[in-house]
Every structure is written in structure tokens, then in C-alpha cells.
Image (spheres, helix red, strand yellow):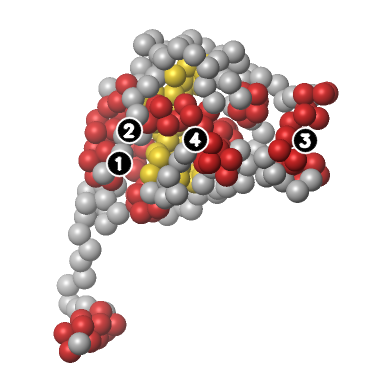
């Protein structure tokens, strides 16, 4: 399967810690999956480290995560009132329920009813072609990924970087087909002990062949920076070198 080769190539070139994460919306669970309940922000970490995880409405431990992934309808009634109170007074991620409402109203809705399962696994272990490939990486690796992805067409991503981790990392890029960058929501970073320099870049799978194909051609991959013949080096570069030598 070609995505196994993609995984190997990307791990080598970017020097990733762990694997790219395959995310597939499916009507059937993947085989060989870990058992138990998961929060989405924990499942991403474990899938990066080798686990296969089937999330459905029963096994997704976080009600908000199940909603954002489209596995369950939006909470209503007392359940929704509790969620509002928890986000404003508990997690303190929004200053008011109106602010929380505004975030929900201005971001892309979840893919409700799309599938029974959201399967997370290392890319090289994916049983079917994934919908998304998620990278847990540092800022330099994120820069390289976005540069490689935009090398073929130059079209900048339309990102959504506010909201829950499960929305930013999975739901938004799935629904929109856009590359997205996520710093996670702060409480997810804190509770799951993400490192200060870690962030997520999500690449819709249909963009991955172009990204991998850019590796040998783009300086964000393995191509060397070269100055066009006859132009010489930029004056600022020559002056900088002369200054270092005189110093």
C-alpha cells in the first residue's frame, strides 16, 4: 500500500518522533485495535506511538470530542448547559457563554452522521486509504510540511486555529479538505502533557501524493538551495560573509 511508503519517507526526511497518524472515517472498526475508552487528544498521542484506535460514540470518552468528530449530535438541554458552564467556569477557555456560542457559530460544523467509527492508527498500519494524515511535530517540521504541500500549486491553506483540538486536528480538515495547523486547546495540552514545542499539522490525504512528490524538488525536502547561474550570490549574503570573516 502506497501510504506505507509515504510514512517511511516522511519519517526519514522530517526526522519525526513516531509515525504520521492516519485518520479514517469508516462504517466498520479496524482490526487489531486497542480496547477501552479514549479522549481524542490522548488517542492522537497513542496512535502516533503505534496504537490502532477505534473511536465511536461509546468509546470516545469525551462527550465534546464525540460531538466534534460527528459521532453524536450536539448536546442539548441540561447537558449543553453543563458544557457551557464547564468551558467558561471550569476550563476557563471562554469568557462567557456568548463567546463560546460565537466560536461555534463561526467555525465549520462537525461531520455528523458520516460514519460509525473514526479510526486512528500509525500511517504505515492503516488498513484503508486514510481521509487525513496528522503530524505531531515541532515548528520547523510544520514549516517544512506546509511548504512541501503548497510547493506544487502555491495555494495557501485556509486554517481554523481556534476551538477544540478534535475540531482543529480532525473535523475541520475533514469537512473542508483544507490543510490545518493546530496548537491544541490549552487544557488538552496541559492534561495530556504535550511538549511546549509540539503542534499538529493535518494534511488531507488527497494532498499527500503531491507533498511527497515535492520532497526531492523543494528545499523544504531534500533539494539544495542554489543560486541561478550568472546571477551570483545576493549582495546581502556576500556582505554578511565578509563581515563574519573580518570579525
Q: Secondary structure at mark 3?
A: helix
Question: Marks 1 and 2: CB-CB under 8 Å?
Answer: yes
The picture places residue 60, in percent across and down from the top left corner, at 57, 20
Q: Is residue 151 above or below residue 76?
A: below
The picture places residue 179, in percent across and down from the top left corner, at 48, 43
Q: Please tell me the numbered disc located at residue 241.
A: none
Pointer 3: what residue?
85
Q: Please tell me the numbered disc located at residue 19.
A: 2
Distance between the alpha carbons at the discs numbered 4 and 2: 18 Å
Q: Nearer the viewer, mark 2 or mark 3?
A: 3
Q: Residue at x 53, y 41 (%)?
A: 190
Distance between the alpha carbons at the discs numbered 1 and 2: 7 Å
Distance between the alpha carbons at the discs numbered 2 and 3: 37 Å
Q: Nearer the viewer, mark 1 or mark 3?
A: 3
Q: Secondary structure at mark 1?
A: loop
Q: Please tell me the numbered disc located at residue 16.
A: 1
Say whether disc 4 or disc 2 marks the residue closer to the N-terminus: 2
Few, some or many residues within 10 Å of mark 4 (<14, 14–19, 20+):
few
**Farthest residue, direction bottom:** 246
Amino acid at each position: 500500500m502506497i501510504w506505507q511508503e509515504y510514512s517511511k519517507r516522511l519519517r526519514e526526511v522530517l526526522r519525526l518522533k513516531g509515525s504520521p497518524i492516519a485518520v479514517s472515517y469508516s462504517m466498520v472498526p479496524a482490526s487489531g485495535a486497542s480496547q477501552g475508552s479514549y479522549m481524542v487528544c490522548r488517542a492522537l498521542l497513542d496512535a502516533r506511538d503505534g496504537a490502532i484506535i477505534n473511536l465511536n460514540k461509546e468509546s470516545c470518552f469525551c462527550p465534546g470530542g464525540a460531538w466534534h468528530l460527528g459521532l453524536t449530535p450536539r448536546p442539548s438541554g441540561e447537558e449543553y448547559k453543563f458544557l457551557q458552564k464547564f468551558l467558561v467556569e471550569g476550563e476557563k477557555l471562554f469568557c462567557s457563554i456568548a463567546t463560546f456560542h460565537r466560536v461555534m457559530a463561526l467555525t465549520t460544523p462537525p461531520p455528523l452522521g458520516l460514519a460509525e467509527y473514526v479510526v486512528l492508527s500509525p500511517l504505515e498500519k492503516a488498513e484503508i486509504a486514510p481521509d487525513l494524515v496528522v503530524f505531531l511535530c515541532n515548528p520547523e517540521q510544520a514549516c517544512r510540511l506546509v511548504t512541501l504541500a503548497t510547493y506544487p500549486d502555491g495555494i495557501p491553506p485556509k486554517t481554523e486555529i481556534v476551538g477544540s483540538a478534535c475540531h482543529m486536528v480532525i473535523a475541520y480538515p475533514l469537512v473542508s479538505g483544507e490543510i490545518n495547523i493546530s496548537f491544541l486547546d490549552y487544557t488538552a495540552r496541559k492534561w495530556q502533557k504535550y511538549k511546549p514545542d509540539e503542534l499538529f499539522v493535518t494534511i488531507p490525504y488527497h494532498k499527500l501524493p503531491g507533498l511527497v512528490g515535492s520532497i526531492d524538488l523543494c528545499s523544504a525536502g531534500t533539494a539544495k538551495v542554489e543560486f541561478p547561474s550568472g546571477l551570483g550570490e545576493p549582495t546581502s549574503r556576500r556582505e554578511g560573509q565578509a563581515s563574519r570573516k573580518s570579525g
